[in-house]
Amino acid sequence: MSFHNSIGKNIRIALADIAKEDKVLNLILPPKSMEKFIIVKIDSIDEMGVWIEHEIEAELDENDDGEKLLQTQREKKFVRAKFLIKWHYIEGAYAPLDDDVNSKMKFLR
């Protein structure tokens, strides 16, 4: 199995120490997950790295019509977003042999 076969699936990634310095990853991932493996859903792969789909909490400051909301009208929602994990941030990646991310894993990289 390769990274390309893992698109749309959850995999485990072991992050290199340098990844802990990335401001974006520090914002989206809980501190404890930065210590070991992270489980992420692969959106796509390119020469820069692995694009992941991740749910984050965001405060909406516009309504559906694009009008600015007052501070008291703003609400927080969970939204799906895509983020890049650069190749040099990845020490190892493992895909489950079946649909259970906790099952036996196959080494990808």
Image (cartoon, grey):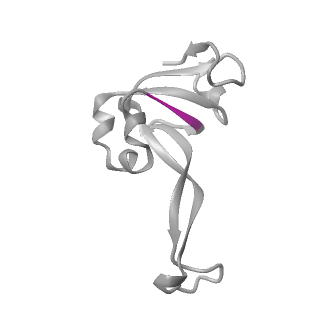
State how many labels appear: 0
Q: Quadrant of residue 105?
A: top right
Residue in front for this viewpoint, 82 or 49: 82
77 and 54: which is toward the camera: 77
- Magenta stretch encompasses residue 65: no
The percent coordinates of residue 71 (x first, y second) are 46, 83
Say whether residue 39 is magenta.
yes
The spot of residue 72 in percent (x, y) is 50, 83
Q: Position of residue 79 (x, y in %)?
A: 59, 58
Residue sitting at 55 percent across and 46 percent down? 54
In the visual, does 107 lie left or right of 91?
right
Residue drawn at x 50%, y 69% is: 59
Judged by its main secondary structure, the magenta piece is strand
Q: Is residue 58 above or below residue 84?
A: below
The image shows residue 96, relative to residue 41, as above or below, that is above
Figure quadrant of the N terminus: top right
Q: Which residue is drawn at 39% across and 51% down?
A: 27
**Residue at the spot 44% in from the left edge and 38% down from the top edge:** 85
Horizontal and vertical percent for residue 30? 42, 43
Q: Is residue 81 left or right of residue 23?
A: right
Residue range of the region highlighted in magenta in the rendering: 37-41
